[in-house]
Amino acid sequence: MNCREGCGACCIAPSISSPIPGMPQGKPAGQRCVQLSAANLCQIFGQPERPAVCSVFSAAPDVCGETDEQALQLLTWWEQATA
């Protein structure tokens, strides 16, 4: 499955413990990444500053659902279930 352009759920729902440019302590779950543009696109996609956890994330139906809203709900659920 390919990412839905402009979804951004994976940049909002999960916590990220590694440093992100502009967020040196990472980001808590549910907080929008500072590198997520207004169009919900990663501003550091493909750059070495992008956290490894972001680079290895693969969109899949069980975490992304069929809509952007489902993706946010599912990723929030996965974050809470694995916290």
Image (spheres, rainbow, N blue to C red):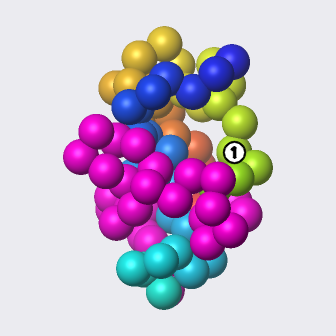
Residue 2 lies, in percent from the top left, at 64, 22
Residue occupying the point 61% across, 72% down: 49
Residue 29 lies, in percent from the top left, at 43, 62
Residue occupying the point 40% across, 62% down: 35
Could you tell me which quadrant the C terminus lies in? bottom right
Q: In the displayed structure, does residue 6 sit left or right of residue 20? A: left
Assign a secondary structure to mark 1: loop
Residue 55 lies, in percent from the top left, at 70, 53
Where 52 sits versus 59, above or below?
Answer: below
Q: In the displayed structure, does residue 31 sit left or right of residue 59? A: left
Q: Which residues are magenta?
A: 25-53
- Dot 1 crowding, Cα within 10 Å, few <14, some 14–19, many 20+: few
Residue occupying the point 68% across, 68% down: 48
In this orientation, does residue 77 appear? no
Q: Is residue 31 magenta?
A: yes
Residue reaching furthest to the left = 38
Residue reaching furthest to the top = 66
Residue occupying the point 46% across, 50% down: 42
Q: Amino acid at mark 1?
A: Phe
Q: In the displayed structure, does residue 37 sit left or right of residue 62? A: left
Q: Which residue is mark 1?
A: 57
Name the image quarter holding residue 28. bottom left
Where 4 sits versus 30, above or below?
Answer: above
Residue reaching furthest to the front = 47
Q: Is residue 51 magenta?
A: yes
Could you tell me which quadrant the N terminus lies in? top right
Name the residue nearer the viewer: 45 or 76.
Answer: 45
Where 21 sits versus 81, above or below?
Answer: below
The number of numbered badges drawn on the structure is 1
In this orientation, does residue 6 appear? yes
Q: Main secondary structure of the magenta part?
A: loop
